[in-house]
Image (tube, grey):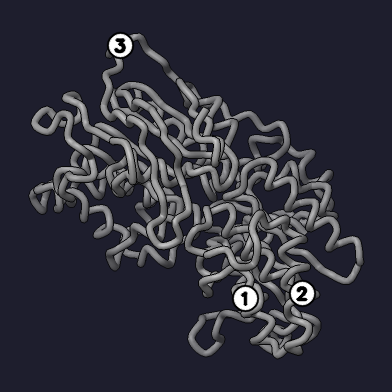
Amino acid sequence: MLLVGRSGSGKSTLLAALAGLLDPSVTETEGELLVGGRPPREASGSTGLLFQDPESQIVMGRAGDDVAFGLENRCVQTSEIPGRVREALDAVEFPYGPERSTSALSGGERQRLALAGTLALRPRLLLLDEPTANLDPMGADRLRSVLGRVLEGGETTLVLVEHRIEQSLALVGRLVAIDGRAGVVADGPPSEILAADPARLAERGIWSPGFSAAVAITRSDGETPAALVHADGASFRYPASGVDAVNATDVVLRSSEALAITGPNGSGKSTLALLLGGLIAPSAGFVRATDALAPDRAGTSLASFGARDLVRRIGSVFQDPEHQLLAGTVRRELMIGPRRAGMAEAAALARANELLERMSLSHLAEANPFTLSGGEKRRLSVATALATAPRLLILDEPTFGQDPRGWIELLGLLSSLREDGHGLCVVTHDEPFVDAIADRRLLMAGSAGSA
């Protein structure tokens, strides 16, 4: 079954409920939810859940130990565990051995490892929350092949949450669309539901095959692009593991221009984004600010900038939005950057309210950021990067978890920022987004460096 709906419609919450992770004593509920005729907590031994954020379920330092962790908790016989670990790692085509440090994995590699841990449990009910969101196209195809083999046995029920559904249709025989307030708004064979008007489906949060996101993307001949950041032979090696994440890379980020960084999982895209944003120092080579970015610090290493200097010039959006959430409410989250940059309280509040409206988050202003859906957290993380009006924006998977409406709004916003003279650097696997926004592409090739 394919479960779809707008960002924030309750898809992830429903999966958590099916897995027995919601405590009925502290959760306000109505109606009845049964798994195999029993309350979900009683049936949890036959259920496997892959979270939207794979990092939240990786708990061990080595890949093999992480897959074994769930088996040990299910009291699987010790003699069976090594074989089931190898079987699960092979099933997801994990590119390393069981000794691989989990801290050295990319987001997509963590996604694959977390899936291996889920499959090793051999669940009867398999719940997957956007399992391809952080995977490159080849990795996503491999994952769908794995799911196809799992389903061939006829003993597993799959509930799959995805926004981009076209490639997953071959796996499912039923499509259910939900809305947070209206409940189920569509339920039936995918072919019948998807025969409706694509624009109407998009309003329900469904990316139907062939849906064209009509966005007016302007590319004016206005301001001449100016170099903002120079990377010269920049590389990075993880100090603890000695693993090379980025080999020597040369790249220039410019104003009024969007650069897309693409490439397979594990090729160093996210690490390069951290280097270009001044958030980590290169192991070798240089990442320097230019006169156009920082007139008083031209030629200086970005990694030497203090937080206040950096936040006024560069806004960064991490691959995992939870890594940059600090405050107790969404509105206060949006005020952190402006306050750090020295903005007065009234001005910081006005800026926060402006961004709440712009990112369609006003109704969540007083909510705790950690209670938002994945797509809402992503929009919030983009808003926090915009809060100080930086000249350069570096965004890692900005379209993650977005329904059609959110995707279109985000694309339009970033396009207008580029036209206003901001520089954009986007790490993404979203090819339609690259086609729509990018002026240049940097293809990362893993151990071979960049191309």
Q: Earlier in the sequence, mark 1 or mark 2?
A: 1
**Residue 2 horizontal/vertical position (percent):** 74, 56
**Amino acid type, mark 3:** Gly
Picture layout, residue 48 above or below residue 436: below
Dot in front, 1 or 2: 2
Asked which secondary structure carries label 2, the reply is: helix
Check whether the beta carbons of the residues at disc 2 and disc 3 lie within 8 A of each other. no
Q: How many marks?
A: 3
Asked which secondary structure carries label 3, the reply is: loop
Q: Residues within 10 Å of mark 1 (few under 14, many from 20)?
A: some
Left or right of residue 247: residue 265 = right
Check disc 1 and report the residue beneath it. Answer: 17
**Residue 302 horizontal/vertical position (percent):** 23, 40
Q: Earlier in the sequence, mark 1 or mark 3?
A: 1
**Residue 386 horizontal/vertical position (percent):** 29, 41
Q: Which label belongs to residue 222?
A: 3
Check whether the beta carbons of the residues at disc 1 and disc 2 lie within 8 A of each other. no
Check disc 2 and report the residue beneath it. Answer: 84
Q: Is residue 249 or residue 291 the one in the foreground?
A: 249
**Residue 180 horizontal/vertical position (percent):** 56, 61
**Amino acid type, mark 2:** Arg
